[in-house]
Image (spheres, coloured by chain):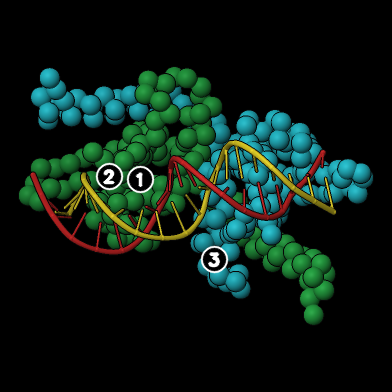
Chain colours: A cyan, B green, C red, D yellow
Amino acid sequence: MATNGKPLTQPEAGSHGADSCYVVREILSRVGDKWSVVTCVLLGEGSLRFGELLRRGHGVSQRMLTQTLRQLERDGLVWRKATPTVPVTVEYGLTPPGEDLLVVLRPLFEWATKNVTMVQDSWVQYDDRLARAASDTFGQG
Amino acid sequence: MATNGKPLTQPEAGSHGADSCYVVREILSRVGDKWSVVTCVLLGEGSLRFGELLRRGHGVSQRMLTQTLRQLERDGLVWRKATPTVPVTVEYGLTPPGEDLLVVLRPLFEWATKNVTMVQDSWVQYDDRLARAASDTFGQG
DNA sequence: CAGTATCCTTCATGATACTG
DNA sequence: CAGTATCATGAAGGATACTG
């Protein structure tokens, strides 16, 4: 029915209101999601139509964009307005909670931006140490 | 060599310093990662040994804990100290950048906690609307 | 235009068994 | 104790073709 077999996460039918821990993790998983964040950021600058999102979405596929938008809509972070023109016109935007999320996300973006260099350096160091350890073990030549 | 075939993310060998956009997304993906956040939160209360993390890790497997710790270590968010006792003793803790990350993550946790009810309600509403639309389409009886 | 449906490949994760 | 190696499975994501 939806864009794939298991379109929207549901632990078990009717398990709503079980442990909020599950829901929190579910929400956090959006942040790591490949397309949720970029979609929210795009919509943070103003509402957009599907095609616009697709074009600006840094290579997101139609299938993934639909899926991401449905998920965000189901979470209550994004609204959808379909106008029955021919062909149909659909507009997406952030709901108030969606805007709020973007606000608390911003410090995280800043942390990430500030620490890009540190993380990359750490990668290099870690990989070097690994490589050296390996060549020590194997005698390297 | 590591715990699975492709232990740590590397776009291409030597592509360090390419686009920071990639790195930022890579970092954000830790937040959505099933075990990175819970590991960091546990370590945020103080350094712990592997076994302790395993026990407190809400069902994380040995393999996944190792993998998560390696990744966080490579990112420079977590330090590792092995003491050559018999058997070996290994302790993990947050680095200063790791602590910083936890700080900017806290507003996100708060948002998630505050919005758990809203999100769950949104799920119910969305699913109800879907179900109603389906029964309308199929005549339901 | 804005999707859906289907196929296919790769990746993530868990279970299990083994080791310095 | 703190891992590593291997296997198996399901989910994630992309490509493509079709439609109201």
Chain label for disc 3: A
- Locate the C terminus of chain B by quadrant: bottom right
Residue B3, numbered label: 2
Give the answer, above or below, for where B101 lies relative to A136. below
Apparent side of residue A90 relative to residue A2 in the rendered image (left or right)? right
At x 65%, y 59%, the residue is B119
Q: Tell me whether marks 1 and 2 sit on the same chain.
A: yes
Chain label for disc 2: B
At x 79%, y 76%, the residue is B140
- The answer to whether residue A53 shows anywhere in this view is yes
User: Mark 3 belongs to which amino acid?
Assistant: Pro
Give the answer, above or below, for where A34 lies relative to D11. above
Question: C6 or A73: which is nearer to us?
Answer: C6
Q: Residues within 10 Å of mark 1 (few under 14, many from 20)?
A: many
Q: Name the residue that disc number 3 marks.
A: A11
At x 66%, y 52%, the residue is A3
User: Mark 1 belongs to which amino acid?
Assistant: Thr
Q: Residues within 10 Å of mark 2 (few under 14, many from 20)?
A: few
User: Sequence order check: which comes first, mark 1 or mark 2?
Assistant: 2
Tell me whether circle 3 and circle 1 mark residues in contact (CB < 8 Å): no
- Locate the N terminus of chain B by quadrant: top left
Tell me whether circle 1 and circle 2 mark residues in contact (CB < 8 Å): no
Apparent side of residue B88 relative to residue B52 in the rendered image (left or right)? left
Q: Tell me whether marks 2 and 3 sit on the same chain.
A: no
Question: B93 or A26: which is nearer to us?
Answer: A26
Q: What is the distance, in whole Å, between disc 1 and disc 2 at their CAs? A: 10 Å
Q: Residues within 10 Å of mark 3 (few under 14, many from 20)?
A: few
Q: Name the residue that disc number 1 marks.
A: B68
